[in-house]
Amino acid sequence: MQQGEQRPEQASRPGDGVPPPTPYARTHRRGGAVVVELRGEIDLGSAGQVDPHLTAAALWPQPLLVVLDLGAVEFIDCYGLSLLVRARHQVLDNGGRVRMVCVHRPTRKLLALTGLDGLFHPVRTLDEALLP
């Protein structure tokens, strides 16, 4: 952790409705936001470990900002993208906002090719995603 950086508050305490961390997903609070960190390959094979995190974040009563952090994603396929789109719809239906962090060039390219970059407007850092 770098100087001045906030330590994330774990959201996976008993009774809070957030699944424990998996090799593909971890959910935590950062300031007034819920951050879902995804990593590795997000596809049909990892969906069972990713989807519970996305759903829990989307249905979180507070805060109204959910950040999808794809900073450590190495690969995502159409099934993985569909999970993100569905989570976005759930967050919006719950009155929240969604921001996305994405630095992986192939993932950014896939978002652009599918037109989802216009839906998610990915930024390069978590700090940028957390700006008001």
Image (tube, rainbow, N blue to C red):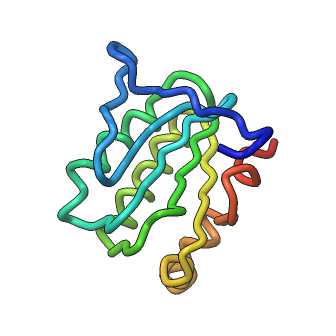
Give 78 or 92, whichever is nearer the viewer: 78
Quadrant position of residue 62? top right
Query: How many numbered discs, if any?
Result: 0
> Residue 8: x percent and y percent?
59, 33
Taking the spot 56% from the left edge, 31% from the top edge, the residue there is 29
In the image, residue 58 sits, relative to residue 25, either above or below, namely above
Q: Quadrant of the C terminus?
A: top right
Taking the spot 51% from the left edge, 40% from the top edge, the residue there is 91
Give 83 or 17, whichever is nearer the viewer: 17
Q: Which residue in the rendered view is the most extreme toward the top?
A: 15
> Residue 108: x percent and y percent?
56, 78
Give 112 or 26, whichever is nearer the viewer: 26
In the image, residue 17 sits, relative to residue 25, either above or below, namely above
Q: Quadrant of the N terminus?
A: top right
> Residue 122: x percent and y percent?
64, 65
Taking the spot 33% from the left edge, 74% from the top edge, the residue there is 78
Quadrant position of residue 38? bottom left
| Left or right of 25 on screen, residue 98 | right
Quadrant position of residue 96? top right
Taking the spot 35% from the left edge, 65% from the top edge, the residue there is 40
> Residue 82: x percent and y percent?
36, 63
